[in-house]
Amino acid sequence: MGPVPDLDERATACARRLHDAESVLLASHIDADGLTSAAIASTALERAALPHEVVFKKQLDEEEIASIAAREYDTVLFTDFGSGQLDDITDHEHAGDFQPVIADHHQPADATTEFHLNPLLEGIDGASELSGAGASYVLARALAETGEDSPDNRDLAALAIVGAVGDMQTVDGELVGANEAIVADGAEAGVVEEATDLTLYGTQTRPLPKLLEYGNDVRIPGISNDEQGAVAFLQELDVDLQTDGGWRRWVDLSADEKQTVTSALLQRALERGVPSAKAQRLVGTTYRLLDESKGSELRDASEFSTLLNATARYERADVGLAVCLGDRDEALDQARKLLENHRRNLSEGLDKVSKQGVEQTEHLQYFDAGGEIRETIVGIVAGMALGTDGVDPDRPIIAFAQKNDEEMKVSARGTGRLVGRGLDLSTVMKTASRAVGGDGGGHDIAAGATVPAGQEEAFLEEADAVIAEQLN
Ligand code: C5P
Ligand code: C5P
Ligand code: C5P
Ligand code: ZN
């Protein structure tokens, strides 16, 4: 039995079909989840001695599907996308261009196909319980079980966790549901460890003052965004802060030292008026990859996923894939350079939103980044902006970015609370974009679309109306 029993039947069918393929084209999405999906699937195919090629697409539209159909492969394995584009894909299936096999977690379109592995088809949530990498992992386990002489592929759980964390699937800081079953698999295989630790981003790599200064989920007055404040806070503690010449990182501290810093940080947050429930988010569940060295981005699932986004969203999916497949030399160096650039872009993007501010319609808030934020990261910026000063944490946010002369990219982000009240951004993006001649989809909590340039206002009106209906 696989890690997600409800998906066993679908996974086994997909795996058997892949074993029968002559040649497989593996197509995946260009983000952390898509990269880890591809790495998991590619490794499993290779272990099963199934020849294949890997390609990445920013988006799977009609044109891209046609270009895939034009290739000579008899079988196409789609990971981390495909379900939302089933209408187009099955046109090619029926024309005999290729046999699709899909491992995805996005909202499926109306058409149906035989080899389709998607948590939503079995009542499992695709935004919080299983990612594309998770679906690919379930498939990888089934490939092993239905094949000969293959290892069981449980080691690939580590990448599946990076994918889930990269897609922000945690609920109250923790992976749940099918994701949790994969964590258990990874722990059993000795590749993953779940630990309670400081949740600030950068425990592996950031010098201590930077770790505190840049923490932006829980803002602590006098420390967050305050270099001198962060240094002064640390200096008051009975902890050695420097090693020969450099700042120590969180990973370099002993358990006692970490306890000292954590307690002081919590106390300071409370003193400065951070609500207790929020301050408690400073400590939570973290996921460590035990085969990676301490102090490497790859050791921490959250840092690893950011590193991957820094490659694939900048047309260097090849670099990210190589890192996932084990290249710790050239590809990792290159990824680290891309990461610096990505971090700078995110921080400049957030600055831009905060200077420009967001505008309101009755039921949503939005900003138009024009050509100033890359369309591949505007959704990440929108998500990070929710809850910063001047941005209502309780309202869906929509962001526009120029895609090319004719088209605008739209990204939408919501919150768990809004989804609880009925928000489904996947439907909002699909309905509103189609009404103005575009297309879109995604998840209830995060979705995207492409619309013709000049249709932004009309799109917003449609989106506002759909949201109004959902929240009533
Ligand atoms: O295409 P894909 O499913 O991989 O992308 C999911 C997107 O949804 C990510 O950009 C992720 O940050 C976003 N998301 C979010 N909040 C959640 C779940 C997903 O912003 N709770
Ligand atoms: O678990 P412990 O408190 O000793 O962790 C020290 C630091 O070292 C943690 O913040 C974690 O980032 C890192 N660590 C790790 N792998 C471990 C244990 C700790 O990366 N197995
Ligand atoms: O691009 P962005 O990060 O905003 O995407 C959010 C979610 O919406 C992702 O899961 C993405 O795959 C999905 N999406 C989609 N169709 C689009 C654009 C985005 O399904 N045209
Ligand atoms: Zn995904």
Image (cartoon, rainbow, N blue to C red):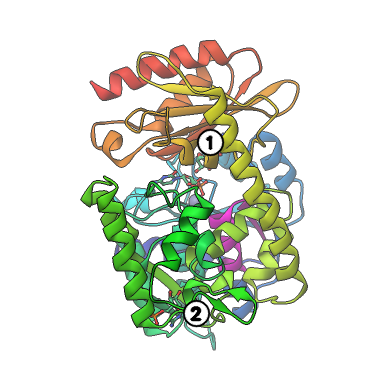
Q: Is 467 placed above or below 36 here?
A: above
Residue 74 in view: no
Where is residue 264, by image quadrant?
Answer: bottom left
Circle 2 Cα neighbour tier, 10 Å, few/some/many (<14 / 14–19 / ≥20): some
Element type at mark 2: helix
Going by the numbered disc 1, the residue's amino acid type is Asp
Which residue is denoted by mark 2 in the rendering?
252
Going 64% across and 24% down the picture, which residue do you hit? Answer: 408
Q: Is 390 placed above or below 139 here?
A: above
Going 27% across and 59% down the picture, which residue do you hit? Answer: 267
Q: Is 72 placed above or below 361 here?
A: below
In the image, which residues are magenta?
Answer: 24-42
Ligand 2 position by quadrant: bottom left
Element type at mark 1: helix
Residue 459 in view: yes
Circle 1 Cα neighbour tier, 10 Å, few/some/many (<14 / 14–19 / ≥20): some
Going by the numbered disc 2, the residue's amino acid type is Asp
